[in-house]
Image (spheres, helix red, strand yellow):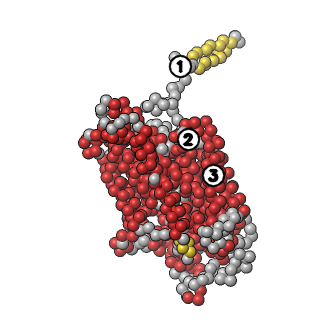
């Protein structure tokens, strides 16, 4: 008999005599997972989960990557391949990860109790998230450095009379003439020489010591991350109310200011100009596919970790549609903000738009600050802009760290009791590795990590994930799980995408990634061969988890025959007793043919 609660009722009669009565009330039953396990910690509110997913997926790349790709690849015509790949691959994979985490109530590694031989891919995505944290936090520290530098009457990247400036500094470098090819703007020199101090390094083999200014900013970022994550989703779910909503407020404010600037409309027209002939170029389709792969955040284990804290009956299908759509709409919306200011810069300096349009860190730390510096009240606009960058980065970094923490504490149960200490260990370890990126030559380390940590390896990880779920676990069985949660079975479209379209798409992307690989470079600097070898070792270390764990699992499972070992390895752990009786679902033709 379960525990009872005592309910005390006080009744007052008219004559002043008080009577009390007590009743035994059974407490509301604790929600449990169908497997009989005690219910996992859940989000305080549904909106906490939605904001966390949106905050993770909507990151700096939405501002500095998508608008430039759209402009470069046919303007509005680029939306055709982008939306096509969004529908056939992006949304199905997004939906798949949310459902996988919610049903199994585990992190990226633990969910593979459904097919033990594939657990290595869980460790692959955990490692990738950890590697990304080594350099992603550095971007946030740059934004924090710029934010502190903006609290001044005159922004430090306006003139060339600072101690860090070189003789090549000029108020505007028009690279159309040979004589000015080595000129640099004050904003460019502030970023490279005033913030990074890259002039004090000869390359990746000459890093120097960590710079105390950036180290301090990095320390602040790490402290923010720790106190956002140390209590789990109960704390991180509240932080995202600020970090996930603030960018939309700031983007709207910047757009309202940007469209009033001279030349802004020309910039927006260039952003939206439609050139359907560009669709005949295979590179446009490849770049659209690549953008989809990385913009939604699949393959980092974050969506699995976040959804594992949902209530079992949560409608993950609706969540997948809402959050993935918001992510894409945010990318499109940010393009108006970016190109209104780029059009203004083009008009102000009387140069072609392609002279100022760029992507990556150069857009948000060089071009945009330079545009802001020309506005009345520039310091206020700079503070607003870098607060946006800070919030865009923080919640994405929180997602990556949560993937690592949840994935490991679910796999090694003894860590559950020590979450605060383990979280401290992870963030401090990340901080120590990140120190290499805040040295004089830190930009070279940053570039190397950015190039290798989450490129081909994450495409490979999602490919193995899709194959493991749709083929080995079974798309029909996966659909049954979803129906058990939300009461509605996925339609034929989703099942076909999971089984055929998405795996083929990912296999194509992995092949393209290898075929089009180019060694990293920073400006005119070319990395030495040993640095490229280190980068490939980093990429391979995460991908190697798949075969290494498969070998380990086959060696540790019971049985003397290969066919029996394989049966145990590809059968859900809860059904191993069926293998003992000779019932192996994966050894039937029906399992492989059904959709």
Tell which tag, 3 or 1, sits nearer the viewer: 3
Q: Between marks 3 and 1, how big is the CA–CA gap?
A: 45 Å
Count of numbered circles on the image: 3
Q: CA distance from mark 2 to mark 1?
A: 30 Å
Is residue 15 found left or right of 294 in the rendered image? right
Mark with earlier residue (2, 1): 1
User: Within 10 angstroms of label 3, few (less than 14), some, or many (20 or more) residues?
Assistant: few
Question: Helix, strand or loop at disc 3?
Answer: helix
- Vertical placement of 456 versus 567: above or below? below
Q: Secondary structure at mark 1?
A: loop
Residue at screen point 59% across, 20% down: 5
Q: Position of residue 95 (x, y in %)?
A: 42, 48
Identify the residue at horizontal 42%, vertical 66% (top origin): 287
Badge 2 vs badge 1, beta-carbon distance below 8 Å: no
Residue 35 percent coordinates (x, y): 44, 31
Disc 2 versus disc 1: nearer the observer: 2
Relative height, residue 592 to residue 244 (above, below):
above
Mark 2 lies on a secondary structure that is: helix
Q: Which residue is denoted by mark 2 in the rendering?
A: 409
User: Mark 2 packing: few (<14 Cα in 10 Å), some, or many (20+)?
Assistant: many
Residue at the disc numbered 1? 2
* Residue 374 vertical placement versus 30 (above, below): below
- Residue 563 at least partly seen: yes
Compare marks 2 and 3 and give the one earlier in the sequence: 2
Position of 280 compared to 265: left or right?
A: left
Give the quadrant of residue 45. top right
The crowd level at tag 1 (other Cα within 10 Å; few <14, some 14-19, many 20+) is: few
Distance in Å between CA atoms under marks 2 and 3: 16 Å
For residue 429, the mark is 3
Between residues 504 and 53, which one lies in front from this camera angle? 504
The residue at 54%/43% (across/down) is 408
Residue shown at 52%/28% (left/top)? 30
């Amino acid at each position: 008999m379960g525990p009872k609660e005592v309910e005390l009722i006080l009744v007052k009669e008219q004559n002043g005599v008080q009577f009390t009565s007590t009743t035994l009330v059974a407490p509301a039953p604790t929600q449990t997972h169908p497997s009989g396990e005690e219910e996992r910690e859940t989000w305080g509110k549904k909106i906490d989960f939605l904001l966390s997913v949106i905050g993770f997926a909507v990151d700096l790349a939405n501002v500095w990557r998508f608008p430039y790709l759209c402009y470069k690849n046919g303007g509005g015509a680029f939306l055709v391949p982008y939306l096509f790949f969004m529908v056939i691959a992006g949304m199905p994979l997004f939906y798949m990860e949310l459902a996988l985490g919610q049903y199994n109530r585990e992190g990226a590694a633990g969910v593979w109790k459904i097919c033990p031989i594939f657990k290595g891919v869980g460790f692959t995505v955990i490692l990738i998230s950890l590697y990304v944290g080594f350099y992603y936090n550095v971007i946030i520290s740059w934004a924090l450095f710029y934010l502190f530098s903006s609290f001044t009457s005159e922004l430090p990247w306006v003139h060339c009379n600072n101690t860090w400036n070189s003789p090549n500094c000029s108020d505007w470098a028009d690279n159309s003439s040979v004589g000015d090819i080595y000129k640099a703007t004050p904003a460019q020199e502030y970023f490279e020489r005033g913030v990074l101090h890259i002039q004090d390094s000869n390359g990746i083999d000459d890093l120097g010591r960590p710079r105390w200014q950036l180290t301090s900013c990095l320390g602040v970022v790490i402290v923010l991350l720790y106190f956002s994550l140390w209590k789990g989703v109960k704390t991180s779910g509240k932080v995202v109310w600020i970090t996930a909503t603030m960018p939309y407020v700031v983007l709207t404010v910047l757009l309202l200011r940007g469209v009033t600037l001279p030349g802004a409309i020309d910039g927006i027209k260039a952003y939206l100009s439609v050139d359907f002939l560009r669709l005949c170029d295979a590179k446009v389709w490849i770049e659209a596919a690549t953008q989809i792969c990385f913009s939604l955040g699949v393959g980092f284990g974050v969506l699995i970790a976040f959804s594992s804290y949902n209530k079992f009956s949560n409608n993950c299908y609706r969540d997948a549609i809402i959050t993935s759509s918001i992510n894409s709409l945010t990318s499109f919306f940010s393009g108006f903000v970016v190109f209104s200011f780029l059009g203004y810069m083009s008009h102000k300096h009387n140069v072609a738009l392609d002279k100022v349009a760029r992507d990556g860190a150069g857009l948000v730390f060089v071009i945009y600050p330079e545009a802001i510096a020309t506005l009345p009240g520039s310091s206020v606009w700079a503070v607003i802009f870098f607060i946006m960058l800070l919030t865009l980065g923080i919640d994405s970094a929180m997602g990556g760290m949560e993937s690592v923490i949840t994935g490991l504490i679910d796999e090694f149960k003894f860590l559950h009791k020590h979450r605060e200490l383990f979280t401290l260990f992870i963030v401090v370890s990340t901080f120590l590795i990140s120190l290499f990126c805040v040295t004089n030559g830190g930009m070279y380390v940053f570039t190397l990590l950015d190039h290798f940590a989450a490129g081909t390896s994450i495409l490979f990880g999602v490919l193995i994930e899709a194959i493991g779920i749709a083929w080995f676990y079974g798309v029909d069985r996966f659909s049954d799980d979803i129906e058990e949660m939300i009461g509605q079975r996925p339609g034929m479209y989703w099942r076909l995408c999971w089984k055929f379209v998405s795996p083929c798409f990912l296999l194509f992307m992995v092949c393209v990634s290898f075929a089009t690989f180019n060694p990293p470079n920073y400006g005119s600097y070319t990395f030495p061969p040993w640095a490229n070898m280190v980068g490939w070792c980093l990429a391979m270390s995460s991908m190697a988890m798949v075969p290494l764990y498969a070998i380990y699992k086959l060696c540790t499972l019971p049985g003397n025959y290969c066919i029996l070992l394989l049966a145990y390895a590809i059968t859900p752990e809860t059904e191993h007793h069926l293998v003992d009786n000779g019932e192996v679902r994966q050894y039937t033709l029906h399992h492989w043919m059904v959709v």
